[in-house]
Image (cartoon, helix red, strand yellow):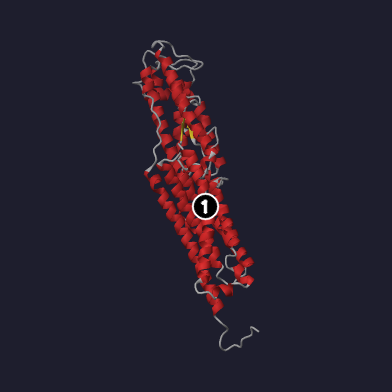
């Protein structure tokens, strides 16, 4: 919850700082004479080229959801705020880190980590001897002698342990969600979605332990079997799914390609600038001449040319990562742990598809930003207060697919839980029948 609060406060600070700085620059621009020459060095609120470049002063952020404290997910690997300037994220990737989220672990030490990895161990510790203890202590025949007592005791043990197992994460989730986002409708939906994932996930592990207690196996064997199921669900199957997922582009090779494109773009700055000016002759002032020393005009044209070359490379990486995520999501029903992890990240709003949607909106917004400033840069005139009013503002919009995603992921979790429960039930039925079947009639009984 503290981590989510810090990130939310940081993003709010970015937004407030951007709006405040634009407001201050607008007031300064209002007091500048229209015929005043643009300043070649230092900040100049009347210079459209310098304002478009940004110098890292303007940022836009992905707003956190009400359930952000439930699962940090990709928020620690992928940027949650982007610098707004004439440089797109493609340009920035050439000199900054191009994160490849599929190469980093999605599991962080947060509430989702505790639920996915440690909740099954708690269930095993609670239920591994729910019936085997009485059978090994010799009290089970006495319980069976009472009509209905055996079934009632087994059901009561399952329900009691299920409640004991789930009460702690549900209370922790309530503190995290309502402490971070208050008691609004979005908070209740986030907590309810968390409960719809945790309750069946916890029931699965308690039920598997209780069902295996119906077999004649001794308690140490049951404990080893349950630990084996935990290793398979949490590590084995997810690793197998990732091994067979499509290959990802090399992060090192991608950055090298971008930097290789960046070098000729910078050396060809003069030609690119002239081509850039010729592309919008109606915006350029005939009386004005290019101002010497104001290198931002050339940078603006260089960034535009570089983006055209770099966009396909970055899009290829984004497509490859989305394909890997789609592959993992399709096969997540094989592992209840994998399905629960993806569902909790989606409820928290830290899932990869939501970040991809944010980056797509960032690309669109920065295209509007450059389209707005491009004619102003070429006009060689001072910006006015009216020009500041026309600067586009960024507002993140949740996609329709994201709004319906929680129900889809909860169905995926339910499918995975039911799949594993049916497998364990089949093993129990097979083991029970094997115990009831005696030696063949044509062979003597050698049990003595």
Furthest residue in direction right, as rendered: 448
Dot 1 falls on a residue whose secondary structure is: helix
Q: Nearer the viewer, residue 140 or 365?
A: 140
Q: Nearer the viewer, residue 47 or 438?
A: 438
Note whether 294 is above or below 12 in the view shown: above
Q: Nearer the viewer, residue 234 or 212?
A: 212
Residue 18 visible within the image? yes
Furthest residue in direction left, as rendered: 282
Q: Position of residue 28 (x, y in %)?
A: 43, 15
Q: Residue at x 57, y 40 (%)?
A: 252
Q: Residue at x 49, y 72 (%)?
A: 148
Q: Position of residue 241 (x, y in %)?
A: 52, 55
Residue 324 visible within the image? no
Q: Position of residue 302 (x, y in %)?
A: 47, 27
Note whether 74 is above or below 162 in the view shown: above
Name the residue that disc number 1 marks.
167
Q: Quadrant of residue 23?
A: top left
Left or right of 222: which side holds 388?
left
Q: Residues within 10 Å of mark 1 (few under 14, many from 20)?
A: few
């Amino acid at each position: 919850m503290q981590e989510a609060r810090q990130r939310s406060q940081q993003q709010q600070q970015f937004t407030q700082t951007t709006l405040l700085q634009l407001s201050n620059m607008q007031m300064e621009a209002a007091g500048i004479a229209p015929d005043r020459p643009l300043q070649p060095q230092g900040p100049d609120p009347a210079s459209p080229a310098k304002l478009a470049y940004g110098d890292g002063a303007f940022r836009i952020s992905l707003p956190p959801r009400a359930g952000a404290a439930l699962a940090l997910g990709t928020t620690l690997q992928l940027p949650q705020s982007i610098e707004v300037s004439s440089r797109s994220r493609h340009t920035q990737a050439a000199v900054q880190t191009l994160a490849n989220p599929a190469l980093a672990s999605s599991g962080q030490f947060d509430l989702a980590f505790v639920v996915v990895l440690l909740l099954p161990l708690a269930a095993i510790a609670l239920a591994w001897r729910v019936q085997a203890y009485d059978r090994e202590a010799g009290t089970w025949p006495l319980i069976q002698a009472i009509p209905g007592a055996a079934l009632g005791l087994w059901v009561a043990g399952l329900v009691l342990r299920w409640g004991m197992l789930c009460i702690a994460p549900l209370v922790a989730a309530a503190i995290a969600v309502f402490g971070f986002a208050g008691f609004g409708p979005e908070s209740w939906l986030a907590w309810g979605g968390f409960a719809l994932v945790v309750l069946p996930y916890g029931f699965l592990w308690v039920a598997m332990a209780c069902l295996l207690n119906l077999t004649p196996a001794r308690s140490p064997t049951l404990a080893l079997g349950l630990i084996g199921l935990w290793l398979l669900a949490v590590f084995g199957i997810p690793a197998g799914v990732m091994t067979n997922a499509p290959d990802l582009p090399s992060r090192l090779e991608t950055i090298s390609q971008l930097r290789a494109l960046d070098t000729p773009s910078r050396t060809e700055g003069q030609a690119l600038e002239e081509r850039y000016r010729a592309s919008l002759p109606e915006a350029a002032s005939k009386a004005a001449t290019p101002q010497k020393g104001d290198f931002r005009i050339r940078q603006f044209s260089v960034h535009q040319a570089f983006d055209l070359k770099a966009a396909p490379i970055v899009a290829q990486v984004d497509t490859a990562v989305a394909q890997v995520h789609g592959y993992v999501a399709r096969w997540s029903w094989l592992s209840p742990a994998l399905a629960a992890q993806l569902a909790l990240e989606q409820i928290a709003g830290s899932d990869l598809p939501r970040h991809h949607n944010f980056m797509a909106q960032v690309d669109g917004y920065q295209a509007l930003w450059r389209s707005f400033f491009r004619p102003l840069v070429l006009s060689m005139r001072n910006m006015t207060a009216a020009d500041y009013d026309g600067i586009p503002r960024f507002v993140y919009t949740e996609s329709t697919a994201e709004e319906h995603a929680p129900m889809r992921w909860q169905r995926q979790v339910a499918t995975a839980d039911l799949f594993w429960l049916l497998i364990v039930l089949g093993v129990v039925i097979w083991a029970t029948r094997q115990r009831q079947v005696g030696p063949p009639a044509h062979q003597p009984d050698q049990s003595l």
